[in-house]
């Protein structure tokens, strides 16, 4: 079952739209920044926000978070909490205030950027918009950089789209993110920074789009692995992303950046072997060709998390150029660290949460896929 670009956007956006309260915090021992900043973070209690907050506080910055107050997170003492609802245009608590920088984490709607621009015009010295690599018009070229064309909204009125209309049609995710970028450049001319993450992974991930693999490989046994193992994969640890964004604002770095990784070509095989090396379960990988998986309706990304076949319209997926971000200071912790920490975090979750992963094949379906593959009499050639 070939995956279209529209399907890819929907799958990635649907997974990214879910939420989960953070269960624990982390202690940072980062050196103090040269100049303390007043940082406003729109959001701040989702996936990357708490990492930004903790790192910023550890660097000596004064942090304010603005959100609806509906999601709990373990944030440091001294963080200021402001409430409002951007879907309703309620930003009253931001009026009459000034900050050195605003980091906008959760926005997928141009109207949210427009409204923030109205309230914060002349009140912030830098505006960081956290976007996505799903803004690109095409994913068919390996090594494409930030100058590649981005999507356009084709609906009636992008400013009338809401959280609910987006959820009803997640095919709008990429176009609306792209239009939000343009609105950011319009509302914050000369002081905007656009960050385009790839697949964000690590502890506290609510989507399980990467978590599935450490959990599955730690369980051991026979594991379905997608394709021939050579398809490229790009991921970014939420901690690396969050901390780097804080360093970007400390250095007042502007521009547009692909924020994914690592800074070398990582194949699916290298990723799975690297994750498996952090466990002692002795999992056996069975590489099943793309067409054989499609015949059993095993979908890339959703059923085989982090994986997209590098062919046709998606030949460049997993191969975005990240050199601009690396030059601007983006660093990557080892894959083994991300995998081990993710598994450690996952084991702290309630049993019912652990029993139902948000992505990947469940045990029964995986067994059926393996049985069908073995029936072809070719599985031994693809086992590692």
Image (cartoon, rainbow, N blue to C red):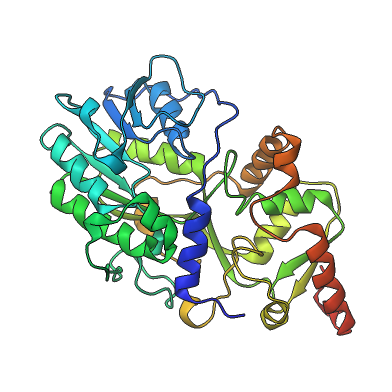
Residue drawn 58% across and 75% down?
309
Q: Is residue 186 above or below residue 52?
A: below
**Label total for image:** 0
Q: Is residue 59 visible?
A: yes
Classify residue 294 as left or right of residue 377: left
In the figure, residue 178 lies in which quadrant? bottom left
111 or 306: which is nearer to us?
111
Q: What residue occupies the far left of the structure in this picture?
A: 122
Q: Is residue 360 above or below residue 141?
A: above
Residue drawn 47% across and 33% down?
51
Q: How far across and down, in percent of the image, does residue 101 sit?
A: 24, 33
119 or 84: which is nearer to us?
84
Classify residue 22 as left or right of residue 179: right
Q: Is residue 269 above or below residue 78?
A: below
Q: What residue occupies the far top of the structure in this picture?
A: 78
Q: How far across and down, in percent of the image, does residue 358 sit?
A: 64, 52
Quadrant where the N terminus is found in the figure: bottom right
Quadrant where the C terminus is found in the figure: bottom right
Q: How far across and down, in percent of the image, does residue 274 sit?
A: 70, 54
Classify residue 115 as left or right of residue 136: left
In the figure, residue 6 lies in which quadrant? bottom left
Q: Is residue 277 visible?
A: no
Q: How far across and down, in percent of the image, does residue 176 sit?
A: 31, 60
Residue drawn 23% across and 50% down?
111
In the figure, residue 78 lies in which quadrant? top left
Residue drawn 14% across and 31% down?
123
């Amino acid at each position: 079952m070939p995956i279209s670009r529209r399907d890819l956007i929907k799958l990635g956006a649907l997974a990214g739209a879910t939420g989960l309260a953070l269960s624990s915090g982390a202690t940072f021992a980062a050196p103090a920044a040269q100049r303390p900043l007043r940082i406003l973070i729109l959001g701040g209690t989702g996936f990357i926000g708490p990492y930004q907050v903790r790192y910023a506080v550890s660097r000596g910055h004064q942090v304010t978070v603005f959100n609806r107050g509906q999601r709990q997170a373990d944030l440091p003492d001294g963080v200021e909490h402001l409430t409002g609802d951007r879907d309703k245009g309620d930003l009253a608590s931001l009026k009459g205030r000034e900050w050195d920088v605003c980091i906008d984490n959760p926005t997928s709607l141009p109207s949210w950027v427009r409204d923030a621009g109205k309230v914060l015009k002349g009140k912030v010295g830098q505006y960081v918009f956290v976007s996505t690599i799903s803004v690109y018009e095409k994913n068919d070229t390996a090594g494409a950089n930030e100058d590649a064309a981005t999507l356009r909204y084709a609906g009636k009125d992008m400013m009338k789209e809401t959280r609910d209309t987006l959820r009803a049609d997640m095919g709008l995710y990429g176009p609306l993110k792209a239009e939000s970028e343009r609105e950011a450049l319009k509302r914050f001319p000369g002081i905007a920074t656009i960050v385009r993450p790839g697949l964000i992974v690590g502890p506290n991930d609510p989507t399980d789009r990467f978590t599935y693999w450490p959990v599955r490989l730690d369980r051991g046994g026979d594991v379905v692995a997608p394709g021939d193992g050579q398809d490229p994969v790009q991921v970014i640890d939420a901690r690396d992303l969050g901390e780097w964004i804080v360093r970007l604002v400390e250095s007042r770095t502007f521009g547009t950046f692909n924020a994914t990784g690592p800074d070398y070509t990582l194949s699916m095989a290298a990723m799975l072997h690297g994750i498996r090396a952090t466990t002692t379960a002795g999992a056996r990988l069975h590489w099943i060709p793309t067409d054989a998986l499609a015949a059993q309706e095993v979908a890339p990304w959703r059923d085989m998390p982090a994986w997209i076949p590098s062919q046709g319209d998606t030949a460049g997926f997993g191969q975005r150029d990240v050199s601009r971000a690396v030059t601007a200071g983006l660093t990557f912790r080892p894959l083994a660290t991300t995998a081990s920490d993710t598994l450690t975090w996952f084991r702290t979750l309630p049993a019912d949460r652990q029993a139902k992963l948000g992505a990947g094949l469940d045990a029964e379906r995986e067994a059926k896929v393996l049985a069908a593959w073995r029936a072809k009499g070719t599985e031994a050639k693809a086992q590692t």
